[in-house]
Amino acid sequence: MNFSKTIFKFIIIFFFTLSFSNISNSEEKNYYKDLITDWSRIFPDSNRNAAGPKFFKYIIDKDINYKDFIEYNKLYCAVSGSLIDPNSDPDFLFISERGTKNKICGNYYKCCIPCSCDIMKYSEVERMKYKFKDGIKEFFVFTIKNPCNKEDFPNRVNKDYFCVGEKINNKQVYDLNGRIVIGLLHNGKSCKKDEIDFVKSHEITGRFCEFRNNTPIENLEAGMGDIFIKLAR
Amino acid sequence: MKIKIISYLKKLVVLFFLLIPNNLNADFFEDITSQIVENPKRLSYGVSVTDVNQDGNFDFIVTGFGYLNLALSYKNGKLINIVNQKKFSDEFRRTIGVAACDMDKDGYEEIYFLNTDTYSGTKKYSDRLIDLDGGNFIDLFEIKKNQKDLNLTAGRSVACVDRKGDGKYGVYVANYGGPTRYYEYDKKIIVDKSVELNLAKITGGRAVVAGHIISDKIDIFAANERGANFLYKNNRGKFLDVAYEYRVQDIRQNGRGTALSDIYYRGRLDILNGNWRGFHRAYVLKDNIFEDIAKPPFDEPSRIRTIISADLDNDGYDEVFLNNIGEPNKLFKILDDGLLQQIPIDVGLEPDGYGTGAAVADIDNDGILELLVSHGESVDQPLSLYKAKVNPNNKYIRIKPLNKHGAPARGATVTLISNLRKHSKTIDSGSGYLCQMEPVAHYGIRKNEEDIKIQIKWTNGKVKTVSINELNQTITLKQE
């Protein structure tokens, strides 16, 4: 008898589920769609050159939990400011930690192969704490130094996004200890020796980046190249 | 024990029929394509609905891309082409967009054929603006005085705009790779007023709709490709683009089929907007911002072309038909609270169909809308004609507003007010993609619906309310 009742309940649940499965009322977040939808709000002048920091600021200002924060930060390129297709694979790389010079390993979601090289060479990572809807979390972020007093500030980058005079425009980008946060290093942690060896021997983060990072800027022909580098160096 | 098991099984059977999902209710549509007389494979695009031959009945106009433009009229149970005059049929100019409206205030709707012989930028042949002179169709753009501002830019959709609310329509031409055009009579000469009206932007124009969107006059929403959408607020007959402020720029998506629809059944027009291989939008106005409430499966990217919002089965809830090209079509029903429920279809699915346009009209005057789907682009295919299988107990009311010149009041908003809803519909100015629907507000009546009134907001913003005492009829409302 109990078996029959169980079957009965199961069938009720099954049909209820089936009945509503074709209704367009999913509560599951579509992070990529959110960024597409709000793109004009993030970049009112449509210039997203090197504007990864704008994405980071937009995301962290949202009223979200830590999981949402992580997922949103997989969908833009910290170097170029372009969107990244959902389900893209990140590059595993290491970056120097500001202050300690320790190597911090983690995943970087990029839009192009040279971006991984540029971020390894021209940015540093720092620990950051932030209070989300589900509590305070700590993570590593990529930062670049304040570019606002540069005489050769790249003219293809919207300076108003980054600067108010010679100060960082903290209404538009996130200011962490006087530096601009450009993106999130996913799963960041101190590197182990075998991880450093892996990065150095990898065909992109190793051989290709060594070649790229020893090429004069004027000879760079791929990636955001000189725009980000001029901003970040 | 046995009796109890039988009792449970009985309950199960009852529950099965109560909870049976709609995806087991196959065949929403009936295929009545056979009603089309002479329906060869062809490259068709936009479809419009107007009274081509002034016989008091609406006809489908179907554009041909290197094929004849057709005027399909319903006669003796069949749809038959009734026009075979060169200026109209125009086999060689490659027509793509079409809309009809009364530009010269004589009560007859001129027909704007947008021709495009190239993808973008400068084209060889201009558009045609067809008028009926006696029994002859003439092209007003062939008259010398009207040739100053011919449109020689590739384009897509056109829509009619009564920008001053005086019944004198202009035509918004969504061009691609060149300035938008806006044609209107000025001192008996047809001129382009796009610059004067702040409409002459260059973009990849795709779809355009016009109606009471954000003001009490006729506003314009244009869905564009490779650039921001436009939302033009009518400001004393001129226009101001407020797409950014209202958050409908959607700059990363490539606009296609667009329709005005009362998504919340709250007595105002919101926007359904399909994006080519992008997220389809259901924009509803909240606190002066359009919020996209579309969720899967409605918003899922597809090769979208036309979008139509209409009550096809006369149940009092609008369906949304998503016409895809080279990909199965989709059908949804707008439930209360903006919920979009997918209706599985077999007939009308057209998995191999190259849909390029579609329009609805009650072409046979039986109180049920027919859906005509055109095909083409890269594959020549015949037209399709569908009709929903309607519960014979369902009732309807159709409102046909005519302006003070006796022409269809395209752009006016009709609202059905009852104990169950406040449901607005636009008298279509041009919508879908490249298309235009019949200029009638068609309502099915819900179960237990009563105290039905009809409110009409004319293109000048003035409102009139009438009570409905008898259903199952078409009521013509004339502007005073």
Image (cartoon, coloured by chain):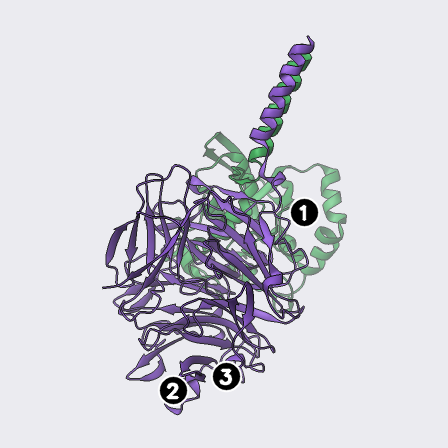
Q: CA distance from mark 3 to mark 2?
A: 16 Å
Residue B87, numbered label? 3
Q: Secondary structure at mark 3?
A: helix
In terms of sequence position, does the residue under pointer 3 or pointer 2 come before the other? 3
Q: Secondary structure at mark 2?
A: helix
Q: Please name the amino acid that badge 2 sits on.
A: Asn
> In the rendered image, what is the letter of the chain coloured green?
A
Tell me the residue that label 1 is attached to: A89
**Chain bearing mark 2:** B
Query: Which of B306/A40 is in front?
Result: B306
Q: Secondary structure at mark 1?
A: loop
**Chain bearing mark 1:** A
> In the rendered image, what is the letter of the chain coloured purple?
B
Tell me the residue that label 2 is attached to: B146
Asked whether disc 3 touches disc 1, contact meaning CB atoms under 8 Å apart, the reply is no
Q: Please name the amino acid that badge 3 sits on.
A: Lys
Q: Are marks 3 and 2 on the same chain?
A: yes
Percent from the top left, x then y, of residue B311? 46, 50
Percent from the top left, x then y, of residue B87? 50, 84
Residue at far top of view:
B1
